[in-house]
Image (cartoon, rainbow, N blue to C red):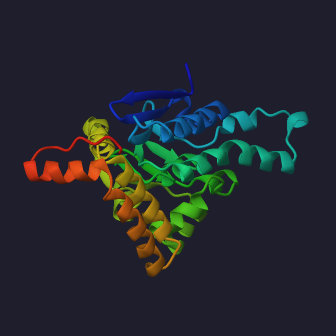
Amino acid sequence: MADLEITTTHRVMIAKLNRPDKKNALSEEMLNSLKSALDMANNDPGIGCFVITGAGDAFCSGGDLGRRANDGVASVPTPLERKMRLQKVTHQVAFAVEQFEKPLIAAVNGVAVGAGMDLALGCDIRLASRSARFSMGYIRVGLIPGNGGCYFLPRLVGTARALEWMWTGDFISSEEALDHGVVTHVHDDAVFWDQAMVLAEKIANGPPVQIRDIKKITYQSLKTDLKTSLDSVSAHMAVVQSTDDYKEAIQAFKEKRPAIFKGQ
């Protein structure tokens, strides 16, 4: 059984973290497969949205602490080896997420702890089941957030609250996560996956060029001034108004029917 299960439903690619007996703790195989899947989906015109979720009753419990505990004294890596392993494996997923041009959704179906919460934070949108819980968790095992938490969390909830959550490792309920903007929707467990797919497919069926441009401009705007952002918008607007999908959207609006987009 693969540590990461990849399936496709219509225009949505789904990556399921698949180590339910370990609460989907991250393995090297899982991370390498996730990076490959993101790269593949990014270049596949048939994919309009990517969803990450977990098997069983957990999203992801973080790094595999059992693997670390089983390291023998003679096999303890040097500080440089630890740094390189983090950068060459785990961080490659963070970079793949950053470079992913299409909508990326975390469907958090259970606990998301440590690196698992970091993975969810790196996505564009996070949805949570009612039973989902979040914790930065690293501090509880004597570590620091190693997979983007220090970068993503303050941008979502502000510096003070992010530091509190990272310093305490306290668990946050799905409702608290909703209140603080960590997730955009909370759904009852029984209907959670169906509701997640409704949103994913709705987004995936939008005009691909416009969807990517919205994501690109939004993230660029967080790092620049208004004048620069609007200048970029004007250039992108000129391009999207020349596409067949723009013409199709206008025609569908006039005819009061769903538009059919082709990414052209």
x and y, in percent, of residue 255 in the image: 8, 48
Would residue 109 be visible to someone looking at this image? no
- Give whichever of 53, 169 is nearer the camera: 53
- Residue at horizontal 63%, vertical 42%? 63
- Residue at horizontal 36%, vertical 49%? 127
- Residue at horizontal 31%, vertical 37%? 193
x and y, in percent, of residue 146 in the image: 66, 54
Would residue 249 be visible to someone looking at this image? yes
Image quadrant where one finds the N terminus = top right
- Give whichever of 75, 17 is nearer the camera: 17
- Give whichever of 39, 148 is nearer the camera: 39
x and y, in percent, of residue 71 in the image: 80, 34
x and y, in percent, of residue 213 in the image: 41, 57
Image quadrant where one finds the C terminus = top left
**Along the horizontal axis of the image, is 35 left or right of 66?**
left
Q: Is residue 136 above or below residue 21?
A: below
- Residue at horizontal 53%, vertical 72%? 223
- Give whichever of 81, 228 is nearer the camera: 228
Residue lying furthest right in this view?
74
Residue lying furthest front in this view?
242
Residue lying furthest top in this view?
1
Q: Exactly how many numbered labels are in the figure? A: 0
The quadrant holding residue 52 is: top left
